[in-house]
Image: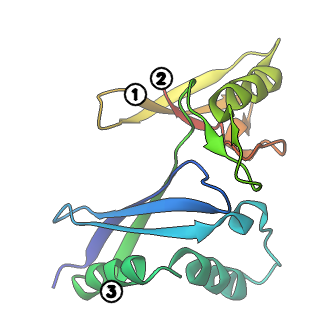
Amino acid sequence: MPETSSVEIRLLAQQVAVYPVEMTLAATQQVFRGQVSADLAVWTPGGDSCIDGQALFDALFASADLMRGWGVAHGKAQQVRVQLRIDAPELHQTCIDGRGADYPCGREARAALSDLVSGQTLNCLARDTDRYGRNVATCSIGVRDIADAPDRTDAGAPGEAAL
């Protein structure tokens, strides 16, 4: 049995009160799908890493298909390496708010990012490429990773994006 198995978990743009989730097993490219409550976006840790980790695991793997995928990944290796990606919406994308109404989440995400970096020097480091061949980067202002910005919208986190 291999020592480590890798999975990529992608949280997609919010749909009403949930975020669709896709989990891909690196070795076989099997894809498992589910959803996680939108409440996860406002969750804050309580300070006990064991309790916090279990709470996040329970929330993320509440969907039966995702839990089945986790079982497959865990059964193939002693340890599972998880890469979590949060998709930023496309510029012209619309999302569904908590009332079920469409809103321009792509434009709102662009405006929030513009407000965050306006007048400052933004440094981006390409870390990967997405399935379309675009660079995926981590960006910071000084030593502050913009993914840690406190002002996020329901549209997603602006910190990691395809450039």
Q: Whole-percent x and y of residue 110?
A: 68, 24
Q: Residue at x 69, y 31 (%)?
A: 109
Would residue 48 appear left or right of 126 to someone viewing this image?
A: right
SS for dot 2: loop
Against 87, residue 36 (above or below) is below
Q: Amino acid at mark 1?
A: Asn
The residues tagged by marks 1 and 2 sit, at their Cα atoms, a distance apart of 5 Å
Q: Whole-percent x and y of residue 33?
A: 38, 67
> Nearer the viewer's eye, disc 1 or disc 3?
3
Q: Residue at x 58, y 69 (%)?
A: 36
- Rate crowding at label 1 as few (under 14), some (14 to 19) or many (20 or more) other CA atoms within 10 Å: some
In this view of the protein, which residue sits in the foreground, 107 or 125?
107
Q: Amino acid at mark 2?
A: Leu
On residue 71, the disc is 3
SS for dot 3: helix
On residue 135, the disc is 1
- Rate crowding at label 3 as few (under 14), some (14 to 19) or many (20 or more) other CA atoms within 10 Å: few
Q: Whole-percent x and y of residue 55?
A: 66, 83
Residue marked by disc 2: 163
Question: Is tag 2's residue or tag 3's residue first in the polypeptide sequence?
Answer: 3
Q: Amino acid at mark 3?
A: Gly
